[in-house]
Each structure stands twice: as structure tokens, then as C-alpha cells.
Amino acid sequence: MPYLLEFTEADLDRPLTEPEKMAETVRAMFDGKKQVRTMDVAERLGRNYGTVKTNLHRAGKLGLLVQVPRRGWLLP
């Protein structure tokens, strides 16, 4: 197949989705030991707690974050 084109994520210039933005925020806040709480992410971004919580859970389902129940979020 000499005319086959393959595209990767790097080839697509698209803005980050909200769950990806939340994962980046958690990545920046994570110190390697202590989990990042949802409330801390909401305060840092100046956003509504419920909206941040929803997007963090979506990021978890996408495999971008790992949730520790009643503790916070970690990197996979």
C-alpha cells in the first residue's frame, strides 16, 4: 500500500479537553507522595467544585488519573 497515510495524536493540532486540562493541573500539583484533593484543584483553577469533580472523574475513566477513594487523585 504505497499511498497509506497514518496519523497520530502528535499530528493533530487540537485544544485539550476539560478532563485533559484537569489531569495536567493534577500533574502540576502532585508532589510524588500526597494525593491531590478535588477541592484543591477547584481552588487553584477558581472553578466550581462540582464541575471540577465531574471532569476529574472523566479523566479517571480515560486513564489519565487514578482516584484514591476519600483521599484524592494520583498519576497512573
Image (cartoon, grey):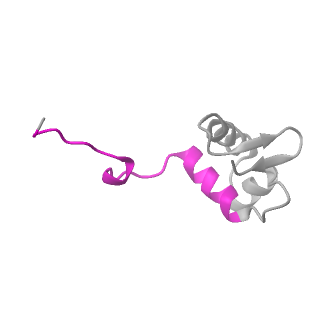
Q: Residue furthest left?
A: 2
Depth order, front residue of 2/32: 2
Q: Which residue is drawn at 79% across and 57% down?
A: 40
Q: Is 37 left or right of 64, judged from the image as shown?
A: right
Q: In which quarter of the image is residue 55?
A: top right
| Residue 32 rendering spot, x and y as whole percentages | 78, 62
| Residue 18 rendering spot, x and y as whole percentages | 55, 46
Placement of the N terminus among the 4 image quadrants: top left
- In the rendered structure, which segment of residues is drawn in magenta? 2-28
6 part of magenta stretch: yes
Q: In which quarter of the image is residue 53?
A: top right
| Residue 75 rendering spot, x and y as whole percentages | 70, 51
Q: Which residue is drawn at 42% across and 52% down?
A: 15
Q: Residue at x 67, y 64 (%)?
A: 28
Image label count: 0
Q: Residue at x 62, y 41 (%)?
A: 59
Is residue 10 shown above or below 60? below
68 part of magenta stretch: no
Depth order, front residue of 53/24: 24
Is residue 5 shown above or below 36? above
Q: Is 10 left or right of 48, judged from the image as shown?
A: left
Is residue 11 shown above or below 32? above
Q: Quadrant of residue 62?
A: top right
Q: Which residue lies furthest to the right in this view?
A: 70
| Residue 33 rendering spot, x and y as whole percentages | 84, 61
